[in-house]
Amino acid sequence: MIRLGINIDHVATIRNARGGIHPDPVRAACVAAAAGANGITAHLREDRRHISENDIQRLLEHIDLPLNLEMAATAEMLELALRYRPHAACIVPERREERTTEGGLDVFGGLARLRPLVGALLEAGIRVSLFIEPDLRQIEAAHALGAPVVELHTGAYCDAPDHRRERELARIVEAAGAAARLGLECHAGHGLSFETVGPIAAIPSIAELNIGHFLVGEAIFIGFDQAIRHMRIVIDRARQG
């Protein structure tokens, strides 16, 4: 069964818009667990625009699911990852002015910078994934770096008009196959919805999907629990063919 990770960043975004403690991302993580999630993802950004260190600490204390910490490739975030020791760390590109992660990490161009960071995380027993474009050069660089997992950025596929979506899907299929041949575990995420998730979930070599913003938005209309349960059904049906 393909794993479903739920990103709770934007529960914290809503909380932070007004201040205070509501809605609580830890409560959202508990709802996600009950609804069939296999893991929780949280991005601790440099500017702390949504998730905070306190959220990370509380998630580790109150949820039984694996925590996937999304983080930039900086000394500050490495120190925090080594302090909290999440199950996994997904290294993502980060720019202060962006609204959300806008593309994949340039592993090919950043091997020298990334190598000591990846090594330190692996030595600490933290599973490392690299958030990359579905590009063969980036996959080969991730393999050379020694990271066991890549997460393919699905944003271009999700945002593509209908006449171009098949082409973007083909890129992801090719990249997932290349990752599998190199012995890398392959994940995917960014922008996935009920409409777009099926073809990605159907790719046999993708082991995990990470989905957040769409489900938090859908929760306004049908509730967080029901949004996750429906996503789980759509994913499982696609995987079963």
Image (tube, grey):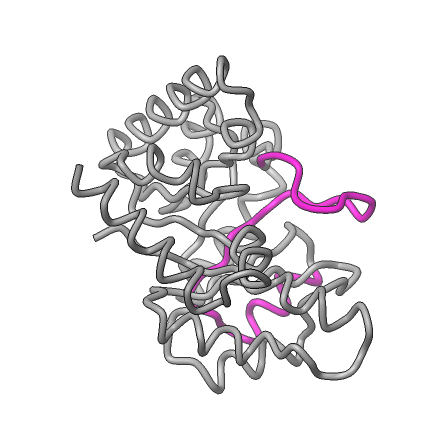
Magenta residue check for 55: no
In the rendered image, the quadrant that contains the C terminus is: top left
Residue 69, image x, y percentages: 53, 62
- Residue at figure coordinates x 65%, y 63% from the top left: 44
- Residue at figure coordinates x 27%, y 34% from the top left: 203
Magenta residue check for 94: yes
Residue 196, image x, y percentages: 43, 36
Asked whether, in this view, residue 141 is left or right of residue 79, the answer is: left
* Residue extending farthest bottom: 61
* Residue extending farthest left: 240
- Residue at figure coordinates x 59%, y 37% from the top left: 105
Residue 92, image x, y percentages: 59, 46
Instruction: Write the start and end of the magenta stretch as one range.
Output: 76-104
Residue 102, image x, y percentages: 66, 37
Quadrant housing residue 84: bottom right
Who is closer to the viewer here, 35 or 149? 35
